[in-house]
């Protein structure tokens, strides 16, 4: 049974007002002191986490399955059970872009490994060698190639482990070939690749570039737009120079510099996307205000609709990406799971426009013909706003 507490005779330590409860009705300060034992802080932490978890349970299912429900609840004044719209959108935005970034990194790594193998081992030269001298020379060439691949610094750990396994297999095949030719097998210590030769071979494929002076001249050209302040022109010039340096390193640099430039640009793009989306959301709210100007709703109401809409889009992007990653992981082990998850992923993609259409119908309460017409125009305008936002984020990312 909850114990009743009397606050008669107590005064707020901050403003001196008489206390009528745990919080001062004048300044809002709590009567409880922050100086408390550690177990008290642990209890408050657990209570806060469980409270947030409760709001997550009440927020995420209707956000995904009930179009417009959270918005109507917010308009109706029932807000305490749910996560605030901006906080919900902010967290889902960061989570979705983080997971999508991981998926892009995996896809890029697999495509690069498939189209441009970093490690290539062939034992044909050992098999074709007719003398022990040719066997030793062929073995040294293959070991030097493996060392060159290691020295690039772009191989993942699994590829580095494969190079060690390939080196051992080459030594075994070389010894088998030497035995077949009647020669004495070489000890493993004498079969190591010379580091100097490996380093030379690692950079041997790099072509000399005579375009460096020309690229430097392109970078030195300042951007001068008459109607912009000098500070903005200087900033644009710096962004352009960094973009050209990244692109040149990615296209014409050595493997290490190219990989670093590529990863730097990808990280820059994903770092610029969340702020760009935060700018897009209030612009989208203005778009809703223009299309529903005769509904006499406040701009803040349209902004809440925009926040909940984008929270749903980010949640859908997160689920679609996770389902795709899970399908890629399970398909080699069980093909049927890949097809089932592919159907689920397709259903999630189709649910996005259907959800947004139903949400627009329920929130603004217009007939289906007018709702469909406005949904098409709003979607068309939003598409171009999104394209411009992504282009700006890509430009800022390439200049990272």
Image (cartoon, grey):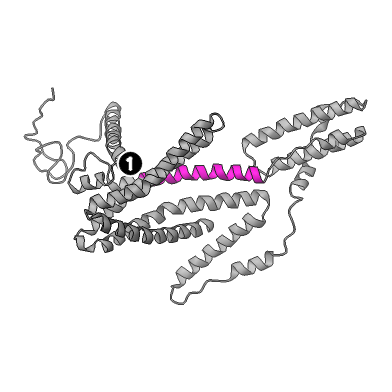
Residue 294 picture location, percent across and down? 20, 63
- Does residue 326 appear in the picture of this structure? no
16 left or right of 227 in image: left
Q: Nearer the viewer, residue 56 or 248?
A: 56
Provide the residue span drawn in magenta. 91-115
Kindly indicate the quadrant of the structure image that contains residue 173. top right
Q: Residue furthest bottom?
A: 226
Q: How many marks?
A: 1
Residue 88, percent from left and from top: 32, 44
For the stretch drawn in magenta, the main secondary structure is helix
Q: Residue at x 39, y 46 (%)?
A: 350
Q: Nearer the viewer, residue 287 or 336?
A: 336
- From what the image shows, is residue 367 above or below residue 317? below
Q: Is residue 187 magenta?
A: no
| Residue 2, x across and y down, in percent | 13, 25
Q: Position of residue 219 (x, y in %)?
A: 60, 67
The quarter of the rendered structure image containing the N terminus is top left
Q: Is residue 112 magenta?
A: yes
Q: Residue at x 63, y 52 (%)?
A: 258
Image-based side of 181 in relation to 283, left or right:
right
> Which residue corresponds to the image point at 25% horizontal and 35% vertical from the top-left?
34
Confirm whether residue 27 shows in the render.
yes
Classify residue 271 as left or right of residue 307. Answer: right
For disc 1, the marked residue is 64
Element at label 1:
helix
């Amino acid at each position: 049974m909850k114990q009743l507490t009397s606050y008669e005779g107590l005064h707020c330590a901050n403003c001196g007002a008489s206390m009528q409860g745990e919080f001062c009705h004048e300044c809002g300060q709590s009567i409880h002191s922050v100086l408390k034992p550690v177990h008290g802080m642990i209890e408050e932490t657990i209570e806060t986490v469980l409270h947030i978890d409760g709001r997550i349970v009440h927020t995420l299912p209707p956000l995904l399955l009930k179009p417009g429900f959270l918005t109507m609840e917010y308009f109706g004044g029932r807000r305490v059970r749910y996560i605030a719209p901006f906080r919900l959108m902010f967290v889902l935005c960061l989570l979705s872009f983080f997971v999508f970034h991981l998926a892009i990194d995996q896809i890029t790594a697999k495509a690069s490994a498939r189209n441009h193998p970093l490690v290539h081992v062939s034992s044909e030269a050992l098999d074709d060698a007719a003398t022990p001298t040719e066997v030793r020379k062929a073995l040294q060439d293959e070991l030097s190639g493996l060392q060159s691949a290691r020295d690039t610094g772009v191989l993942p750990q699994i590829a580095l482990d494969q190079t060690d396994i390939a080196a051992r297999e080459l030594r075994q095949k070389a010894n088998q070939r030497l035995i077949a030719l009647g020669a004495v097998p070489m000890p493993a210590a004498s079969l190591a690749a010379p580091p100097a030769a490996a380093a030379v071979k690692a950079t041997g494929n790099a072509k000399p570039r005579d375009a460096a002076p020309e690229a430097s001249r392109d970078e030195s050209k300042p951007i001068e737009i008459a109607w912009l302040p000098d500070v903005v022109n200087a900033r644009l010039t710096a962004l352009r120079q960094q973009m050209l340096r990244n692109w040149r390193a990615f296209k014409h640099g050595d493997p290490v510099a190219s990989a670093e430039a590529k990863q730097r640009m990808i990280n820059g793009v994903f770092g610029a996307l969340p702020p760009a989306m935060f700018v897009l959301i209030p612009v989208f709210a203005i778009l809703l205000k223009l299309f529903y100007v005769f509904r006499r709703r406040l701009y803040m109401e349209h902004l809440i609709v925009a926040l909940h809409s984008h929270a749903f889009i980010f949640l859908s992007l997160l689920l679609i990406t996770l389902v795709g990653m899970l399908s890629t992981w399970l398909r080699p082990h069980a093909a049927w799971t890949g097809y089932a998850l592919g159907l689920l992923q397709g259903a999630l993609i189709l649910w996005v426009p259907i959800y947004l259409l139903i949400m627009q119908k329920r929130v603004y309460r217009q007939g289906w013909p007018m709702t469909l017409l406005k949904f098409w125009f709003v979607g068309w305008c939003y598409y171009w706003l999104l394209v411009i936002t992504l282009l700006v984020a890509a430009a800022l990312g390439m200049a990272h």
